[in-house]
Amino acid sequence: METEIIEKIRENLIQGRKSEEDEGIDETLNGTPGVIELTEEALEKGVSPKEIISLAITPGMEAVGEKYDSGEYFIPDMLASAQAAGAAMEILKPHLEKARIASKGRVAVATVKDDIHDIGKNIVVILLKGAGYDVDDLGIDVSTEKIVEEVKTRGIEYLGLSALLTSTMTRMKEVIEALDKAGLKGKVRVLIGGAAVSQEYADEIGADAYCADGFQAISAIGALKQQ
């Protein structure tokens, strides 16, 4: 049953069905529970927020990103899925933030310049806050100059950079180079994530860690704190 409802959440997210009133690409889903109803049902049945995010929302949005990159999905399709994911995260947010404890460190998270993707970033922000970090959400489409300035003025210890598209992932390299020129590279640890990037790309541009999702971001920061 748990696997079935996780699959339903993921599929409805990909279809952009926020609630049962929404139509999907697959007409057979019309009139059936959408992401909101399914997320609430999953919680009632004891499915953990971590499982909902890591097995349904994150892979669902990765699939949407792939469809957008390939031209199968257009901006309205991507936004519909993003809104569905955002609605699910609003339901999960209080469950994730319950265990918040004293700050473990200062983190800034941003989606790089020319990229308007924010669901993955928002998930990371919520999870890091729930894990006890002070998190500055710098938003989407953030210029390299602004990111460097925020790191400098806010005393950021860890910087998370997100990119959904292959056309914007090169901005991450620009940010790391700019931090180095500003004398900040050794003072802030850089983590990258998003559908467009990989561990290989993180190694290539000199990032400190690659994170496939928000839970890996928590683990990666914990590991970096020990270094």
Image (tube, rainbow, N blue to C red):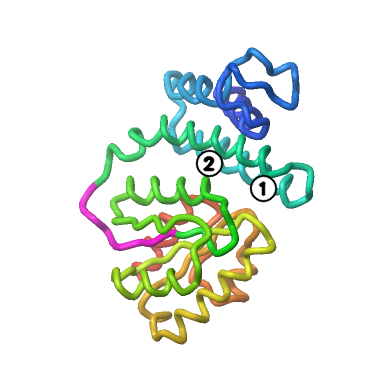
Give the residue at x 69% y 18%: 29
Give the residue at x 45% y 79%: 179
In percent of width and height, residue 15 lies at 67, 30
Q: Is residue 92 magenta?
A: no
Question: Is 167 placed above or below 173 here?
Answer: above
Residue 92, picture quadrant = top left
Residue 55, picture quadrant = top right
Question: Is 99 placed above or below 149 here?
Answer: above
User: Is 15 situated left or right of 92 in this image?
Assistant: right
- The residue lying toward the viewer, choosing from 202 and 2, is 202
In percent of width and height, residue 87 lies at 48, 32
Answer with mark 1 or mark 2, whichever residue precedes in sequence: 2
In percent of width and height, residue 190 lies at 46, 69
Question: Is 33 placed above or below 81 here?
Answer: above
- Which residue lies under the disc numbered 1? 65
- Of the 4 image quadrants, the one containing the N terminus is top right
Amino acid type at mark 2: Ser
- Which residue lies under the disc numbered 2? 54
User: Is 16 situated left or right of 124 in this image?
Assistant: right
Give the residue at x 33% y 34%: 94
- The residue lying toward the viewer, choosing from 1 and 20, is 20
The stretch in magenta equals: 101-109
Amino acid type at mark 1: Gly
Extreme residue in the left direction: 102
In percent of width and height, residue 88 lies at 48, 32
